[in-house]
Image: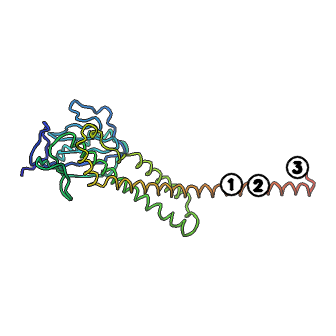
Amino acid sequence: MTTTDSISSTGAPMQNLRLTARALLLGDRLDVAGLERSDVLSITPLAFRAGQDGFVALFRYGVAVLVGLTPLEEDEVIRSLRQRIQGEFARHEEETAIIEISPERDDQIPPGGPIYIKQLSTERLIVIADALSKSAALARDEREAAAVFDIVEPAARHLAEKGRRPPGRREILKHVGHALLVRQRVSGRVAVEEKPDVLWDRPDLERLYARLEDEYELKERATSLHRKLEVIGDTAQALTDIIDTERSLRLELIIVLLIVFEIFITFYQMFTGTPGH
């Protein structure tokens, strides 16, 4: 069997061809405006050929999917995108898959095996790139949500055991702010439930996308992530409400003390005959 890491520029079916696809989460956002080229293959996502015979798909939520590129070609593409990355991550989350063109098979993904496709086409690559990009974004979001859980959980435990918030109001507010920031960033980054636009024109690829969804457990992971975000939001809200309530009680106590002090002064003036102001 012949193995290669190139994509035919003609897009024709090729037997015994294996490609490596890598999805890299580069940052919070990727500005693709003005990147339209003469060799553009798709607008949403923006996809084009790169390197000798490679394929690149760019997603606005910060993911670049590179198919059939050498390491040097990948570095060149990433370097060319660096000025367009908003909130670049020091560590790029990665999802890798092997794509094998096998005309004698249906589009399928056996457990632990490569992604088999009948024909090397732009539409199939876009469907695969969409699933890989969402998986890479979810991996980062899952890790960030877990990190926030590790921060918020001790505060929630202290509240449950002691019946009051943990000490260190400023630290709690920092944790709450971090939790809300993660929730906002994760919720707004990528809608996993949305299918790629290419399926409107190629409904015959619905089955391939459904298999990719199952393989990478996109729906299940998104549902679990949203539940975690809800818990994070509820915990942050509870801690914030407790702090606000404590602040209100302090203000009320100060007001009561001022009133008592004013009454004391009034009685003192009446008792001593001192004229009031």
* Badge number at residue 258: 2
Q: Looking at the picture, tell me which residue is in the foreground, 42 or 276.
A: 42
Q: Tag 3 or tag 1, which sits nearer the N-term?
A: 1
Q: Which residue is mark 1?
A: 251
Measuring from the top left, give residue 135's x and y in whole percent: 30, 51
Q: Which residue lies most toward the left here?
A: 1
Which amino acid type corresponds to the residue marked 1 in the rendered image?
Leu
Q: Looking at the picture, tell me which residue is in the foreground, 142 or 196.
A: 196
Is disc 1 surrounded by few (<14), some (14 to 19) or many (20+) residues within 10 Å?
A: few
Which amino acid type corresponds to the residue marked 2 in the rendered image?
Leu
SS at badge 3: loop
Q: Which residue is rendered at x = 7% and y = 50% of the image?
A: 2
User: In the figure, 222 relative to 76: above or below?
Assistant: below
SS at badge 1: helix
Q: Tag 3 or tag 2, which sits nearer the N-term?
A: 2
Between circles 1 and 3, the one closer to the viewer is 1
Q: Which residue is rendered at x = 52% and y = 58% of the image?
A: 172
Whole-angstrom CA distance, mark 2 to mark 3, is 17 Å
